[in-house]
């Protein structure tokens, strides 16, 4: 078991876990105005002529393979507790972090979490931090101590800045 999480395989497992955590948070934010995801066909149907819209049966449901992939990613996201990864961006490299856990402290400027395995971390909250509660956009005041949340953050030096805070969908 010890050799399973070493070398390339360990890096792959860690990357897959963070990807799952990121997608878990990202899926929770997919309906917000700040989201970069394109609007679903149902939202844009009013802007398009009736003859140009696709039938609901082809647009409303993902293909079976895509649906299976999304279910696998969601299941993985539900098991991830915390992690860090370095990702390549257009501006260079960025360290990103993710954590799922209970809120131990929260204020207008920071949130602290404790994961099930005992790992704790504090994240800075700024004007760019997005919040979701009960599947809807929220404010920092909607997140309470003792709640289970998922945090996605960027890491610069020793500072972890939360980009997204959401209660995981049950």
Image (cartoon, grey):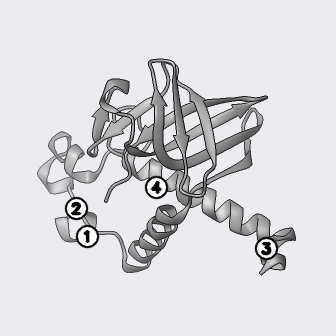
Q: Please name the residue that numbered disc 4 is placed on.
A: 24
Closer to the observer: label 2 or label 1? 1
Instruction: Choose the circle earlier in sequence order: 4 or 3.
Output: 3
Identify residue for label 2: 54
Helix, strand or loop status at disc 2:
loop
Residue, disc 3: 9
Q: Position of residue 17 (x, y in %)?
A: 62, 62
- Closer to viewer: mark 2 or mark 3: 3
Q: CA distance from mark 4 to mark 3?
A: 22 Å
Given residues 113 and 53, the one toward you in this image is 113
Q: Residues within 10 Å of mark 3 (few under 14, many from 20)?
A: few
Residue in front for this viewpoint, 7 or 47 = 7
Please state if 2 lies on the left or on the right of 64 as rendered. right
The total number of labels drawn is: 4
Distance from the alpha carbon under mark 1 to that under mark 4: 25 Å
The alpha-carbon separation of the residues under discs 2 and 3 comes to 43 Å
Q: Which residue does the image show at 37% across and 43% down from the upper left?
A: 147
């Amino acid at each position: 078991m010890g050799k399973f999480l070493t070398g390339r395989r360990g890096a792959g497992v860690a990357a897959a876990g963070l990807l799952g955590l990121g997608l878990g948070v990202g899926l929770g934010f997919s309906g917000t105005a700040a989201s970069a995801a394109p609007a679903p066909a149902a939202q844009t149907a009013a802007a398009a002529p009736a003859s140009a819209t696709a039938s609901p049966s082809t647009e409303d449901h993902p293909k079976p393979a895509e649906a299976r992939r999304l279910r696998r990613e969601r299941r993985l996201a539900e098991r991830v507790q915390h992690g860090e990864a370095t990702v390549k961006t257009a501006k260079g490299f960025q360290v990103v972090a993710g954590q799922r856990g209970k809120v131990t402290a929260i204020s207008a400027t920071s949130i602290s979490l404790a994961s099930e395995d005992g790992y704790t971390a504090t994240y800075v909250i700024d004007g760019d931090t997005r919040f979701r509660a009960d599947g809807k956009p929220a404010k920092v005041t909607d997140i309470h101590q003792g709640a289970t949340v998922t945090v996605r953050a960027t890491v610069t030096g020793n500072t972890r800045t939360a980009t997204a805070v959401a209660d995981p969908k049950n």
